[in-house]
Amino acid sequence: MTREKILEALGNVQEPDLGKDLVTLNMVKDIDINGNKVSFTVVLTTPACPMKDMIGNACVNAIKLLVNKEAEVKVNFTSDTSSKRTDPGTVLPNVKNIIAVVSGKGGVGKSTVSANLALALAQGGAKVGLMDADIYGPSVPIMFGVRGERPVMMDIEGKGMIVPLEKFGIKLLSIGLLVDEKNAVVWRGPMASSAIRQFVTEVYWGDLDYLVVDMPPGTGDIHLTLVQTVPVTGVVIVTTPQDVALADAKKGIAMFGQAQINVPIIGLVENMSYFTPAELPDHKYYIFGKDGGKRLAEEYDIPFLGQIPLVQSIREGGDTGVPIMMGDDAITKKAFEDFAGIAARSIAIRNANMGATKVIEMVS
């Protein structure tokens, strides 16, 4: 066995999402051959890659079939999260992907989805931040059990910067950590937009693979401010299956598809898809309708990221400050893990096939 023969064999293994082979994509590193033993590292485009096992098995089969059927093959994995920030610039220069989680209306569980998406990506090995941009209804302090805590200031290259809190392995910031929760945030649009700009220009987020931004419901000032301030990699749309939510989700899709904004849709996730009682685990009750989000994704030809069930433990976790990804409900955790894996995969495909992310310079 030689290094050349190993590379030639691995040249037949396709990366299923990017449509090219591992060698062409420069994903094979550190080949080590010792007699019949060969080991190498495959560099994935995301730590949360759901195709990892499939790629590993394909590598082993290629070497046994094309090089040496007696070979003992060890495939190691590492990751270098893909990004399309060709010029990081001065705003969040070390953040590879900025993902806005949006919904056309309130009450569809957008903050719950944002929180557990961030946690699932982090548990997959990524460096993740969660920015609560829902100025008027911040949920992060309650959902992460950090009510009453305050972020500290740090001097970074002569500039005072806010340092996000850290909880469950991710970085957090919310307006709810900066104002008294008993007081309503009574701000006109320009003040809210100014706060969002501050959250990205005066907060020390550091090195991140993903910054998940929990946006307010609707389509308004804060959404426009975000895309005009930072290069947003893409948008995750959250809806429930019911027609009222779907009608508003369409507005969110339409907003980011407008020519003057044109931010890619990473995909759509359907929350509260069905209810399964604990005592009847094989039963599904479609309280808000069935497959509405899936049909909407098909209608608009955008990736469908999965279905999240309506489960009491999700609500309890959010209320007690321990999100479901940190709990013991294996079935519900699996739903969020699958969703996060497909979302990470969709982000990698977006980075491979679309142009560089950019700040939207002008919205008429």
Image (spheres, rainbow, N blue to C red):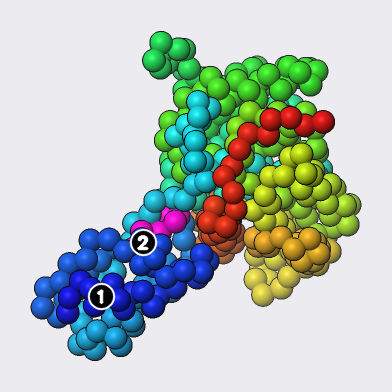
- For mark 2, what is the residue? 27
The answer to the question of whether label 2 and label 1 lie on touching residues, with beta carbons closer than 8 A, is no
Q: Position of residue 55 (x, y in %)?
A: 41, 72
Q: What residue appears at the point 67 percent right and 56 percent down from the top-left corner?
A: 267
Q: What residue appears at the point 50 percent right and 29 percent down from the top-left corner?
A: 89
Identify the magenta region. 42-47
Q: Locate the N terminus by quadrant.
A: bottom left
User: What separation in Å lies between label 2 and label 1 (alpha carbons)?
Assistant: 13 Å
Q: Secondary structure at mark 2?
A: loop
Closest to the observer, 358 or 326: 358
Q: What residue appears at the point 48 percent right and 17 percent down from the top-left corner?
A: 161
Closest to the observer, 39 or 315: 39
Closest to the observer, 132 or 14: 14
State the image quarter where residue 364 is shown: top right
Q: What residue appears at the point 33 percent right and 81 percent down from the top-left corner?
A: 62
- For mark 1, what is the residue? 6
Q: Position of residue 217 (x, y in %)?
A: 77, 38
- Please say if 290 is above or below 96: below
Residue 287 visible, this angle: no
| Drawn side of residue 215 relative to residue 128, left or right | right
Residue 356 lies in the magenta-colored region: no
| Drawn side of residue 83 relative to residue 62, left or right | right
